[in-house]
Image: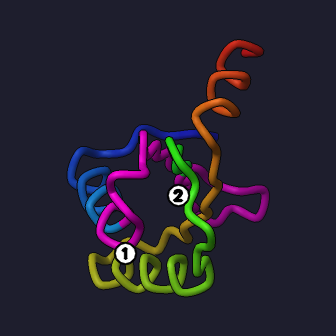
Amino acid sequence: MIDTVDVRLRDVIDTYVRGRLSDSQIGAVRIEREVNASGEDVVNVTVVFGRPPRSIQIGSLTRKLWEELAARNDAAFPIFSFLTREEDAQLSAAA
């Protein structure tokens, strides 16, 4: 089940992602709150790059955002996915 994300959470995550990755390379950050099959809250974070970086430290990206959410009394676990603009366009056209 996907829920809407409140504006404050969206701003926190968007600012967090753009602060840790090169903002000039990011085309969009999409956020969806969901409950997984085990009943746990997750936040799906899709980062769309105009020009992908050479590497991303995903472990620390996830861990530090999870800590940030926990500090705000939000137990959701962040799940990141990364797309290029071309991949994003192809997925949007197929939907």
SS at badge 2: strand
User: Relative to 71, does residue 5 appear above or below in the rendering?
Assistant: above
Residue 45, given in percent of the width and then of the height, sits at: 52, 54
User: Relative to 91, does residue 93 appear above or below in the rendering?
Assistant: above
Task: From the viewer's perspective, tell me whether residue 26 is left or right of residue 43.
Answer: left
Quadrant, the C terminus: top right
Find out whether residue 10 is within the magenta segment: no
Q: Camera-side residue: 43 or 56?
A: 56
Residue type at tag 1: Leu
Q: Camera-side residue: 26 or 13?
A: 26
Whichever of labels 1 and 2 marks the residue nearer the N terminus, that label is 2
Q: Residue at x 77, y 15 (%)?
A: 94
Residue 48, given in percent of the width and then of the height, sits at: 53, 44
Residue type at tag 2: Val
Task: From the viewer's perspective, tell me whether residue 84 is left or right of residue 45.
Answer: right
Quarter assignment of residue 9: bottom left
Q: How busy is the neighbourhood of tag 2: few (under 14 within 10 Å), some, or many (20 plus)?
A: many
Residue that label 2 marks: 43
First to last magenta residue range: 17-45
Quadrant, the N terminus: top right
Residue 69: mark in rendering: 1
